[in-house]
Amino acid sequence: MVVLGIDAHKRSHTVAAVDAAGRLLATKTVSADAAGHLLLVRWAGQFGERRFAVEDCRPLSRRLEADLLAVGERIARVPPKLMAKARDSARSYGKSDPIDALAVARAALREPDLPTAVLDGPPRQLRLLVDHRAGLVAERTRVINQLRWHIHEINPDWQPPARSAHRPKHLTLLRGRLADATGLVAELAGELAQRCAQLTVRIGELDRQISEHIAVLAPTLLALPGCGSLTAARIVAQTADITRFRSQHAYARHNGSAPVPVWSGNQQRHRLSRIGNRQLNSCLHTIAITQLSHYPPGRQLYERRLANGNTRREALRVLKRRLSDVVYRCLKADATISPLT
Protein backbone atom coordinates (compact mmCIF):
# COMPACT_ATOMS: atom_id res chain seq x y z
CA MET A 1 0.00 0.00 0.00
CA VAL A 2 1.35 3.42 -1.02
CA VAL A 3 -0.03 6.56 0.61
CA LEU A 4 0.01 9.75 -1.44
CA GLY A 5 -0.14 12.85 0.74
CA ILE A 6 -1.34 16.05 -0.89
CA ASP A 7 -0.61 19.62 0.20
CA ALA A 8 -3.37 21.60 -1.54
CA HIS A 9 -3.18 25.27 -2.55
CA LYS A 10 -5.18 27.63 -4.75
CA ARG A 11 -2.87 27.40 -7.76
CA SER A 12 -0.98 24.13 -7.27
CA HIS A 13 -1.05 20.82 -5.42
CA THR A 14 2.06 18.98 -4.26
CA VAL A 15 1.91 15.21 -3.66
CA ALA A 16 4.38 12.98 -1.83
CA ALA A 17 4.25 9.17 -2.12
CA VAL A 18 5.42 7.04 0.82
CA ASP A 19 5.57 3.29 1.34
CA ALA A 20 4.20 1.33 4.32
CA ALA A 21 7.29 2.23 6.35
CA GLY A 22 6.91 5.96 5.68
CA ARG A 23 9.87 6.20 3.31
CA LEU A 24 9.56 8.87 0.63
CA LEU A 25 9.25 7.35 -2.85
CA ALA A 26 8.57 10.37 -5.07
CA THR A 27 7.08 13.87 -5.16
CA LYS A 28 5.24 15.82 -7.83
CA THR A 29 3.58 19.22 -8.20
CA VAL A 30 0.58 19.77 -10.50
CA SER A 31 -1.66 22.72 -11.29
CA ALA A 32 -4.90 23.10 -9.32
CA ASP A 33 -7.23 22.58 -12.30
CA ALA A 34 -8.82 19.70 -14.17
CA ALA A 35 -5.75 19.14 -16.34
CA GLY A 36 -3.49 19.02 -13.30
CA HIS A 37 -5.83 16.61 -11.51
CA LEU A 38 -5.81 14.29 -14.55
CA LEU A 39 -2.01 14.43 -14.63
CA LEU A 40 -1.93 13.55 -10.94
CA VAL A 41 -4.15 10.49 -11.46
CA ARG A 42 -1.96 9.26 -14.33
CA TRP A 43 1.21 9.78 -12.29
CA ALA A 44 -0.26 7.93 -9.30
CA GLY A 45 -1.10 4.94 -11.51
CA GLN A 46 2.50 3.72 -11.29
CA PHE A 47 2.08 2.80 -7.61
CA GLY A 48 -0.63 0.17 -8.00
CA GLU A 49 -2.50 -0.23 -4.72
CA ARG A 50 -2.70 3.28 -3.28
CA ARG A 51 -4.64 5.66 -1.09
CA PHE A 52 -4.71 9.45 -1.21
CA ALA A 53 -4.56 11.65 1.89
CA VAL A 54 -5.45 15.35 1.83
CA GLU A 55 -5.10 17.97 4.53
CA ASP A 56 -8.65 18.75 5.68
CA CYS A 57 -8.96 22.22 4.18
CA ARG A 58 -12.00 21.81 1.98
CA PRO A 59 -12.21 25.24 0.33
CA LEU A 60 -8.82 24.42 -1.25
CA SER A 61 -9.26 20.68 -1.82
CA ARG A 62 -12.97 20.29 -2.65
CA ARG A 63 -12.53 20.36 -6.44
CA LEU A 64 -9.54 18.03 -6.22
CA GLU A 65 -11.45 15.57 -4.02
CA ALA A 66 -14.42 15.56 -6.40
CA ASP A 67 -12.19 14.76 -9.40
CA LEU A 68 -10.34 11.99 -7.56
CA LEU A 69 -13.54 10.43 -6.24
CA ALA A 70 -15.06 10.55 -9.73
CA VAL A 71 -12.34 8.17 -11.00
CA GLY A 72 -12.67 5.80 -8.04
CA GLU A 73 -9.77 6.88 -5.83
CA ARG A 74 -9.90 6.59 -2.03
CA ILE A 75 -9.19 9.74 -0.02
CA ALA A 76 -8.53 10.21 3.70
CA ARG A 77 -8.86 13.64 5.31
CA VAL A 78 -6.01 14.53 7.68
CA PRO A 79 -6.70 17.14 10.39
CA PRO A 80 -4.06 19.91 10.31
CA LYS A 81 -2.98 19.23 13.91
CA LEU A 82 -1.94 15.66 12.97
CA MET A 83 0.03 16.96 10.02
CA ALA A 84 1.85 19.43 12.26
CA LYS A 85 2.92 16.66 14.63
CA ALA A 86 4.18 14.55 11.74
CA ARG A 87 6.21 17.47 10.41
CA ASP A 88 7.77 18.15 13.82
CA SER A 89 8.93 14.53 14.15
CA ALA A 90 10.61 14.46 10.72
CA ARG A 91 14.34 14.91 10.19
CA SER A 92 13.83 17.67 7.62
CA TYR A 93 13.89 21.30 8.72
CA GLY A 94 11.82 24.25 7.56
CA LYS A 95 8.46 24.30 5.83
CA SER A 96 7.75 23.78 2.15
CA ASP A 97 5.08 22.16 0.01
CA PRO A 98 6.99 18.83 -0.36
CA ILE A 99 7.65 18.76 3.41
CA ASP A 100 3.96 19.42 4.14
CA ALA A 101 2.83 16.76 1.62
CA LEU A 102 5.20 14.24 3.23
CA ALA A 103 3.77 15.12 6.67
CA VAL A 104 0.23 14.55 5.38
CA ALA A 105 1.16 11.12 3.99
CA ARG A 106 2.92 10.01 7.20
CA ALA A 107 0.06 11.24 9.38
CA ALA A 108 -2.42 9.23 7.28
CA LEU A 109 -0.14 6.20 7.53
CA ARG A 110 0.05 6.51 11.31
CA GLU A 111 -3.72 7.04 11.77
CA PRO A 112 -5.69 4.35 9.89
CA ASP A 113 -9.14 5.46 11.12
CA LEU A 114 -9.22 8.94 9.59
CA PRO A 115 -12.50 10.12 8.03
CA THR A 116 -12.83 9.49 4.32
CA ALA A 117 -13.92 11.99 1.70
CA VAL A 118 -17.27 11.58 -0.05
CA LEU A 119 -19.02 13.50 -2.80
CA ASP A 120 -20.98 16.55 -1.67
CA GLY A 121 -24.65 16.02 -0.86
CA PRO A 122 -27.53 17.82 0.90
CA PRO A 123 -25.43 18.67 4.01
CA ARG A 124 -23.08 20.69 1.81
CA GLN A 125 -26.00 22.68 0.36
CA LEU A 126 -27.34 23.26 3.85
CA ARG A 127 -23.97 24.50 5.03
CA LEU A 128 -23.80 26.97 2.14
CA LEU A 129 -27.20 28.36 3.13
CA VAL A 130 -26.27 28.58 6.82
CA ASP A 131 -22.92 30.25 6.10
CA HIS A 132 -24.53 32.72 3.69
CA ARG A 133 -27.15 33.61 6.29
CA ALA A 134 -24.45 34.15 8.92
CA GLY A 135 -22.63 36.49 6.55
CA LEU A 136 -25.78 38.53 5.91
CA VAL A 137 -26.52 38.75 9.65
CA ALA A 138 -23.00 40.03 10.27
CA GLU A 139 -23.41 42.59 7.49
CA ARG A 140 -26.76 43.72 8.92
CA THR A 141 -25.18 44.16 12.35
CA ARG A 142 -22.47 46.36 10.84
CA VAL A 143 -25.09 48.44 9.00
CA ILE A 144 -27.20 48.86 12.16
CA ASN A 145 -24.18 49.97 14.19
CA GLN A 146 -23.32 52.62 11.63
CA LEU A 147 -26.97 53.65 11.33
CA ARG A 148 -27.29 54.17 15.09
CA TRP A 149 -24.34 56.60 15.11
CA HIS A 150 -25.94 58.67 12.34
CA ILE A 151 -29.28 58.68 14.17
CA HIS A 152 -27.58 59.78 17.37
CA GLU A 153 -26.07 62.70 15.50
CA ILE A 154 -29.41 63.72 13.97
CA ASN A 155 -31.70 63.16 16.96
CA PRO A 156 -30.95 60.73 19.84
CA ASP A 157 -34.68 60.42 20.58
CA TRP A 158 -35.16 58.58 17.28
CA GLN A 159 -33.12 55.59 18.40
CA PRO A 160 -35.09 52.31 18.09
CA PRO A 161 -35.15 49.97 21.12
CA ALA A 162 -32.14 47.76 21.70
CA ARG A 163 -31.93 44.63 19.50
CA SER A 164 -34.93 45.71 17.43
CA ALA A 165 -33.53 48.11 14.83
CA HIS A 166 -33.99 45.46 12.10
CA ARG A 167 -37.72 45.04 12.74
CA PRO A 168 -39.93 46.35 9.92
CA LYS A 169 -42.09 48.60 12.11
CA HIS A 170 -39.06 50.42 13.55
CA LEU A 171 -37.38 50.72 10.15
CA THR A 172 -40.57 52.09 8.59
CA LEU A 173 -40.94 54.69 11.34
CA LEU A 174 -37.28 55.65 11.11
CA ARG A 175 -37.29 55.99 7.32
CA GLY A 176 -40.34 58.26 7.55
CA ARG A 177 -38.53 60.55 9.98
CA LEU A 178 -35.37 60.57 7.89
CA ALA A 179 -37.36 61.50 4.78
CA ASP A 180 -38.31 64.78 6.47
CA ALA A 181 -34.75 65.49 7.66
CA THR A 182 -32.19 67.38 5.59
CA GLY A 183 -28.45 67.10 5.26
CA LEU A 184 -25.90 64.53 4.18
CA VAL A 185 -26.06 62.56 7.44
CA ALA A 186 -29.81 62.07 7.04
CA GLU A 187 -29.31 60.97 3.42
CA LEU A 188 -26.68 58.38 4.41
CA ALA A 189 -28.83 57.17 7.30
CA GLY A 190 -31.74 56.66 4.89
CA GLU A 191 -29.57 54.52 2.61
CA LEU A 192 -28.42 52.44 5.57
CA ALA A 193 -32.00 51.96 6.76
CA GLN A 194 -33.03 50.81 3.31
CA ARG A 195 -30.08 48.37 3.17
CA CYS A 196 -31.01 47.03 6.59
CA ALA A 197 -34.57 46.39 5.41
CA GLN A 198 -33.32 44.55 2.32
CA LEU A 199 -31.02 42.37 4.41
CA THR A 200 -33.83 41.55 6.82
CA VAL A 201 -36.08 40.41 3.97
CA ARG A 202 -33.33 38.22 2.50
CA ILE A 203 -32.46 36.70 5.90
CA GLY A 204 -36.14 35.83 6.38
CA GLU A 205 -36.18 34.09 3.00
CA LEU A 206 -33.08 32.08 3.94
CA ASP A 207 -34.68 31.13 7.27
CA ARG A 208 -37.67 29.69 5.46
CA GLN A 209 -35.46 27.89 2.95
CA ILE A 210 -33.31 26.40 5.72
CA SER A 211 -36.42 25.31 7.65
CA GLU A 212 -37.79 23.50 4.59
CA HIS A 213 -34.49 21.68 4.02
CA ILE A 214 -33.96 20.62 7.63
CA ALA A 215 -37.55 19.40 8.01
CA VAL A 216 -36.79 16.83 5.31
CA LEU A 217 -33.21 15.97 6.31
CA ALA A 218 -33.49 15.76 10.11
CA PRO A 219 -37.05 15.44 11.47
CA THR A 220 -35.85 13.41 14.48
CA LEU A 221 -33.28 16.03 15.42
CA LEU A 222 -35.89 18.78 15.11
CA ALA A 223 -38.04 16.96 17.66
CA LEU A 224 -35.28 17.27 20.28
CA PRO A 225 -36.38 19.84 22.92
CA GLY A 226 -34.35 23.02 22.61
CA CYS A 227 -33.23 22.37 19.02
CA GLY A 228 -34.74 24.82 16.53
CA SER A 229 -34.47 24.82 12.75
CA LEU A 230 -31.33 26.95 12.57
CA THR A 231 -29.54 24.99 15.30
CA ALA A 232 -30.46 21.70 13.66
CA ALA A 233 -29.26 23.00 10.30
CA ARG A 234 -25.92 24.00 11.77
CA ILE A 235 -25.52 20.57 13.38
CA VAL A 236 -26.29 18.70 10.15
CA ALA A 237 -24.06 21.00 8.11
CA GLN A 238 -21.09 20.73 10.48
CA THR A 239 -21.47 16.98 11.04
CA ALA A 240 -21.57 16.40 7.26
CA ASP A 241 -22.22 12.64 7.57
CA ILE A 242 -22.90 10.97 10.90
CA THR A 243 -21.96 7.54 9.53
CA ARG A 244 -18.30 8.58 9.34
CA PHE A 245 -18.14 8.44 13.16
CA ARG A 246 -17.62 4.94 14.54
CA SER A 247 -19.44 5.65 17.82
CA GLN A 248 -21.14 8.30 19.92
CA HIS A 249 -17.90 8.69 21.85
CA ALA A 250 -16.01 9.57 18.66
CA TYR A 251 -18.70 12.12 17.85
CA ALA A 252 -18.40 13.66 21.32
CA ARG A 253 -14.65 13.93 20.80
CA HIS A 254 -15.27 15.63 17.45
CA ASN A 255 -17.69 18.23 18.84
CA GLY A 256 -15.59 18.99 21.93
CA SER A 257 -18.11 17.79 24.53
CA ALA A 258 -15.96 14.86 25.72
CA PRO A 259 -14.17 15.85 28.94
CA VAL A 260 -10.38 15.98 29.13
CA PRO A 261 -8.70 14.04 32.01
CA VAL A 262 -6.33 16.26 34.01
CA TRP A 263 -5.56 14.19 37.08
CA SER A 264 -2.59 12.44 38.59
CA GLY A 265 -2.21 10.30 41.69
CA ASN A 266 -5.17 10.21 44.06
CA GLN A 267 -7.00 13.29 42.75
CA GLN A 268 -9.14 12.39 39.75
CA ARG A 269 -10.90 15.12 37.80
CA HIS A 270 -11.72 16.30 34.29
CA ARG A 271 -11.90 19.69 32.70
CA LEU A 272 -13.77 21.30 29.83
CA SER A 273 -12.41 20.42 26.38
CA ARG A 274 -11.16 23.31 24.24
CA ILE A 275 -10.68 21.19 21.13
CA GLY A 276 -13.14 19.88 18.58
CA ASN A 277 -15.58 21.58 16.26
CA ARG A 278 -16.52 24.78 18.08
CA GLN A 279 -19.62 25.42 15.96
CA LEU A 280 -21.04 22.03 16.91
CA ASN A 281 -20.12 22.73 20.52
CA SER A 282 -21.95 26.05 20.29
CA CYS A 283 -25.08 24.26 19.06
CA LEU A 284 -24.94 21.84 22.00
CA HIS A 285 -24.54 24.82 24.33
CA THR A 286 -27.62 26.48 22.84
CA ILE A 287 -29.71 23.34 23.31
CA ALA A 288 -28.44 22.90 26.87
CA ILE A 289 -29.24 26.47 27.90
CA THR A 290 -32.72 26.18 26.38
CA GLN A 291 -33.40 22.90 28.16
CA LEU A 292 -32.37 24.41 31.49
CA SER A 293 -35.24 26.88 31.12
CA HIS A 294 -37.93 24.89 29.33
CA TYR A 295 -37.24 21.15 29.63
CA PRO A 296 -37.64 19.56 33.10
CA PRO A 297 -35.46 16.44 32.51
CA GLY A 298 -32.52 18.60 31.44
CA ARG A 299 -32.99 20.87 34.43
CA GLN A 300 -33.22 17.89 36.79
CA LEU A 301 -29.94 16.44 35.51
CA TYR A 302 -28.24 19.80 35.97
CA GLU A 303 -29.56 20.24 39.53
CA ARG A 304 -28.65 16.65 40.43
CA ARG A 305 -25.05 17.25 39.41
CA LEU A 306 -24.98 20.44 41.46
CA ALA A 307 -26.25 18.52 44.47
CA ASN A 308 -23.42 16.00 44.01
CA GLY A 309 -20.85 18.74 44.37
CA ASN A 310 -20.21 19.77 40.76
CA THR A 311 -19.75 23.42 39.90
CA ARG A 312 -22.19 25.08 37.50
CA ARG A 313 -19.69 24.79 34.67
CA GLU A 314 -19.08 21.09 35.38
CA ALA A 315 -22.81 20.38 35.57
CA LEU A 316 -23.38 22.14 32.26
CA ARG A 317 -20.53 20.14 30.72
CA VAL A 318 -22.22 16.89 31.83
CA LEU A 319 -25.51 18.00 30.26
CA LYS A 320 -23.78 18.86 26.98
CA ARG A 321 -22.07 15.46 26.96
CA ARG A 322 -25.43 13.74 27.38
CA LEU A 323 -26.92 15.90 24.64
CA SER A 324 -24.08 14.92 22.31
CA ASP A 325 -25.17 11.28 22.62
CA VAL A 326 -28.81 12.24 22.03
CA VAL A 327 -27.89 14.26 18.93
CA TYR A 328 -25.80 11.35 17.66
CA ARG A 329 -28.75 8.96 17.98
CA CYS A 330 -31.08 11.46 16.31
CA LEU A 331 -28.73 11.90 13.36
CA LYS A 332 -28.32 8.12 13.01
CA ALA A 333 -32.10 7.75 12.96
CA ASP A 334 -32.47 10.52 10.37
CA ALA A 335 -29.75 8.92 8.22
CA THR A 336 -31.86 5.76 7.93
CA ILE A 337 -35.03 7.71 7.17
CA SER A 338 -33.49 10.16 4.69
CA PRO A 339 -29.84 9.41 3.85
CA LEU A 340 -27.72 12.56 3.85
CA THR A 341 -25.21 11.39 1.26
Image (spheres, rainbow, N blue to C red):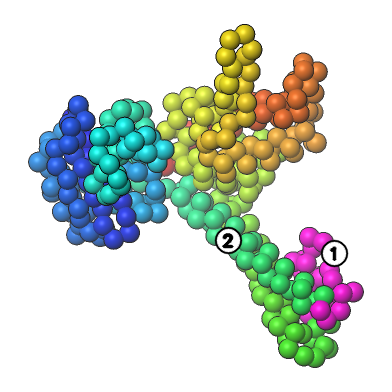
Amino acid, disc 1: Pro
Q: Does the segment drawn in magenta span residue 156? A: yes
Q: Residue at x 63, y 18 (%)?
A: 269
Q: Is residue 158 left or right of residue 103?
A: right
Position of the N terminus by quadrant:
top left
Q: Is residue 295 placed above or below 147 in the rendered structure?
A: above
Q: Is residue 97 left or right of residue 244?
A: left
Magenta segment boundaries in residue numbering: 153-176
Q: Is residue 59 placed above or below 264 in the rendered structure?
A: below
Looking at the image, which is closer to me, 179 or 60? Answer: 60
Image x and y of residue 98, in percent: 23, 46
Callout 2 crowding tier (Cα within 10 Å): few <14, some 14–19, many ≥20: few
Q: Which residue is mark 2?
A: 135
Position of the C terminus by quadrant:
top left
Q: Is residue 75 visible?
A: no
Q: Residue at x 17, y 45 (%)?
A: 27
Looking at the image, which is closer to me, 21 or 193? Answer: 21
Q: Is residue 210 visible?
A: yes
Rendered image quadrant of residue 310: top right
Q: Residue at x 79, y 86 (%)?
A: 179
Q: Is residue 86 left or right of residue 165?
A: left
User: SS for tag 1?
Assistant: loop
Image x and y of residue 24, in percent: 17, 36
Q: CA distance from mark 2 to mark 1?
A: 23 Å
Amino acid, disc 2: Gly
Q: Which residue is mark 1?
A: 161
First of labels 2, 1 by sequence position = 2
Image x and y of residue 264, in percent: 57, 14
